[in-house]
Amino acid sequence: MKRQHIKSIWFCAGLALIVLFGGCSTYKDYSSVPKEIPLTQPEKVAYRIQSGDLLDIKFPLTEKHNEKVVVRPDGNIIVEIAGELKAAGSTPTELAQNLKRLTSHRLKNPEVVVMVAESSQKIFVGGEVESEGTVIFRDDLTPLQAITERGGFKDTADSNRVFLIKLEKDTAKITEINLALIASTRLSANDVLFIPRTDVAKVNLAIQQYIRNMWPVDWRFY
């Protein structure tokens, strides 16, 4: 009994040192976090249609010709009144203009509107968010918006350090962005956002994984 008591004392002392030195060595000064975040408008870049996108094609003056079509792997679509045409690589406005030209011989002064109902391009959000997963990419999507759509930050998230990973061919470019930039940076299709834990959360996790789970101690007494 005495040996177990001494063992428990040494264990608690070791745990106190881990928390003390872990907390001191990883302490951050969060006083520099801005109270006001400048919301600048990112440069607008037109969305380019991709294979797999679901397009909503509307003819406002002749609604019976409205269609929803999926862009095939070869980048083409088939519209009943216009036939087969290339869609991938065009903006919705460019495709609408092309459809307007192709249907002008059958429709009088046709009006065409093309919208991307569902994009095949995603943003991947992982780490310390409430629900890891994907967000459908859209023009001017910011990291903050993508994180919000996945439920927002967990309490354990280091919201002032978000890693933006851009996949380019066979390489990945990793950039660390701070709290101000996550509200203004514009994302590209297939970007990955990773939100790390705070230093305090890392220490707590280490204690849980490497100490509490390994020692058969009734933690209700400590």
Image: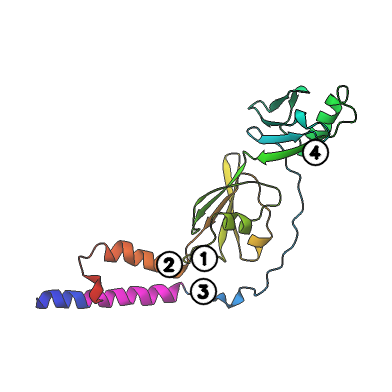
Q: Earlier in the sequence, mark 4 or mark 2?
A: 4
Q: State the separation of the CA atoms marked 4 and 2.
A: 48 Å
x and y percentages locating residue 34 in the rendered image: 64, 73
Q: Please check the rendered image and state whether residue 218 is part of the magenta-colored stretch, yes or no.
A: no
Q: Earlier in the sequence, mark 3 or mark 4?
A: 3
| Image-based side of 139 in relation to 162, left or right | right
Q: State the separation of the CA atoms marked 2 and 3.
A: 13 Å
- Which residue is found at the position 10% from the left and 78% from the top? 2
Q: Which mark is residue 158?
A: 1
Q: Earlier in the sequence, mark 2 or mark 3?
A: 3
Query: Hey, which quadrant is residue 205 in on the image?
Result: bottom left
Q: Nearer the viewer, mark 2 or mark 3?
A: 2
Q: What kind of element bears circle 2?
A: helix
Do the residues bearing badges 2 and 1 touch, measured as CB atoms within 8 Å?
Answer: yes
| Image-based side of 151 in relation to 71, left or right | left
- Which residue is found at the position 51% from the left and 74% from the top? 28
- Which residue is found at the position 43% from the left and 77% from the top? 24
Q: What kind of element bears circle 3?
A: loop
Most prominent secondary structure in the magenta stretch? helix
Q: State the separation of the CA atoms marked 2 and 1.
A: 9 Å
Q: Which mark is residue 93?
A: 4
* Amino acid at the residue labelled 2: Ala
Q: State the separation of the CA atoms marked 3 and 4.
A: 48 Å
Q: Nearer the viewer, mark 1 or mark 3?
A: 1
